[in-house]
Amino acid sequence: MHTITKSKTTPKGSPTSKKSPIASVPQLEVFKNQNAILRNPLPFHHENFEKVGDTFMVKLGPGYKIIFTRDTETIKYILQKNHKNYQKSPLQTKDLGKYIGQGLLTSNGEHWRKHRRMVQPAFHKKKLVGLLDVMWAAVQEEIRRIDTGKVQNVLPMMGDLAFQVVARALFSAEDIRERMQKLQRITILNQKMLIREMRRPYLKWWFQLDGSVKRHLALSKDAQNILDGIVEERLASGEEKDDLLDMLLQAKYEDGTAMPRKQLLDELLILFTAGHETTANALSFTLYLLAKHPEIQEKVYQETQKVDFENGDQMQNLFLLIFTQQCIEEAMRLYPPVYIIDRVSLKDDVVGGRNIKKRTTWLLSMYELHRSQHWENPDEFRPERFAADVKKNHSDYYYPFGAGPRMCVGNNFAMYEMIMAVAGILKKFKLTTDMGEMVLDPLVSLRPKEVMLRFLKR
Ligand code: HEM
């Protein structure tokens, strides 16, 4: 059990109202529970939010504080209103960046701003329309690989699906599956290494000494070489494909120049990293929830009867799958793949009427916000919360794709892909499961330990 030094519930309201200092959880409590926290920090967060209020602080050493919050006004203030004073922590820029390079996800400041401006247009809805057919082709290919009858873990299946969809949308080529599989293996291995480093930060010196960091950096180099080979082939072919790679090749800085090759490779690798695990997790959670709720699954199945991905207009199909979309949105409320967003303040600030020193780390808990008392029976799976007429009531309490200028650049891409995948799977299969409660494995992203489902042919 954790003891709290100063108890103070954060009242709701404007971040400029006068308040007493943020209650802090003693460092000793964190150290005593560090193994459990590293395995799964969610119970620690929840316990303290319930005891202390919507914002609490952990002091981890002289001048090093982390503030946790699930207060929506504070979250909006940091991500939107005063976003200029907040940037991503070294965990994302340095630790993750060392394996996947300096691109959109892993950079701050001017470097980030410049590249966001170049990459974002490739993800505009209008551009994505042209990619829906290749997305569907990739989804369908993965669906064809599903075995029926036996119980299987859908997490790696959805991992393959999400990876192949990003690959096809980027490169629109069909003959790169083998190279993409190698790239996927490298991405997974490097992710595992990062997790080892995060779980045992005190062993960082050892990971350097035993050569693991070096080995994984060499893998990153292999990944870059694979991508470089594909870019070279595209340039040599002189073909225009209108896929994401073409858009990135054509994108220009303000001075009219194109991205240097190294930067292009970093951005490509980052799109794989950012776009594959999050989507795979969201899909796995959605399929689990549908398997657990046969009546809701049946409603989705009925809806899928209205669409024909083989012949129809794909955008029209997506518009018809309204309830399917609500199920995915509700799954991401219960299990937001990006369950924590971190930021570090650049200058001293006043947040919620409290003076906060520069270089304070903030952890914004989307998991807790998504299950806060604002939601009626927050732990229940109720897709109708996202019906068009009521959806906007929750907009302040729901941020699966983040908010503000750093909001997910691939949010529409991800939604289109997930609707296609869920509808495509449910049209073909009935899902059943003997699983009990969901066991979570949160670290870089929130993922299920496993999702064991049976696919029965319809
Ligand atoms: C269900 C799937 C997804 C979820 C839940 C998700 C969630 C998020 C969130 C919450 C952020 C903001 C993080 C922060 O503010 O610190 C983010 C950023 C980002 N996402 Fe996604 N994402 C998903 C899929 C995708 C896909 C499919 C792509 C691309 C193919 C993508 C590319 C990115 C990139 C590049 C960033 C960094 C943007 C920036 O900092 O400017 N994401 N994502």
Image (tube, rainbow, N blue to C red):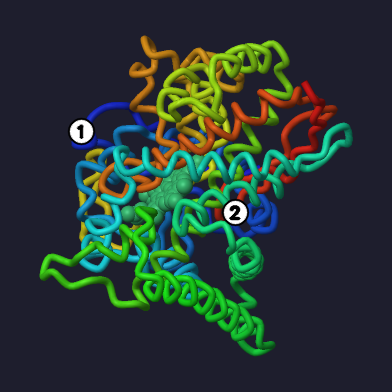
Is the CB of the residue bearing disc 1 within 8 angstroms of ligand 1? no
Instruction: Find numbered disc 1 in the image and state the secondary structure of the residue it sits on.
Output: loop
Identity, as a three-letter code, of the amino acid under mark 2:
Leu
Residue to which mark 2 is pinned: 443
Residue to which mark 1 is pinned: 17
> Is residue 421 something that shows in the picture?
yes
106 horizontally vs 256: left or right: right
208 horizontally vs 170: left or right: right
Q: Residue at x 22, y 56 (%)?
A: 117
Q: Position of residue 247 (x, y in %)?
A: 31, 58
Q: How dense is the environment of label 1, judged by Cα within 10 Å: few (below 14), some, or many (20 and up)?
A: few
Q: Is residue 4 above or below residue 266?
A: above
Between marks 1 and 2, how big is the CA–CA gap?
34 Å
Q: Is residue 390 above or below residue 115?
A: above
439 horizontally vs 75: left or right: right
Q: Residue at x 79, y 30 (%)?
A: 455
Quadrant containing the C terminus in the rendered view: top right
Nearer to us: label 1 or label 2: 2
| Residue nearest the viewer, comparing 382 with 310 | 310
Residue placed farthest to the right in the image? 150
155 horizontally vs 272: left or right: right
Answer with the quarter of the image where residue 185 lies.
bottom right
Say whether disc 1 or disc 2 marks the residue closer to the N-terminus: 1
| Residue nearest the viewer, comparing 305 with 78 | 305
> Is residue 57 something that shows in the picture?
no
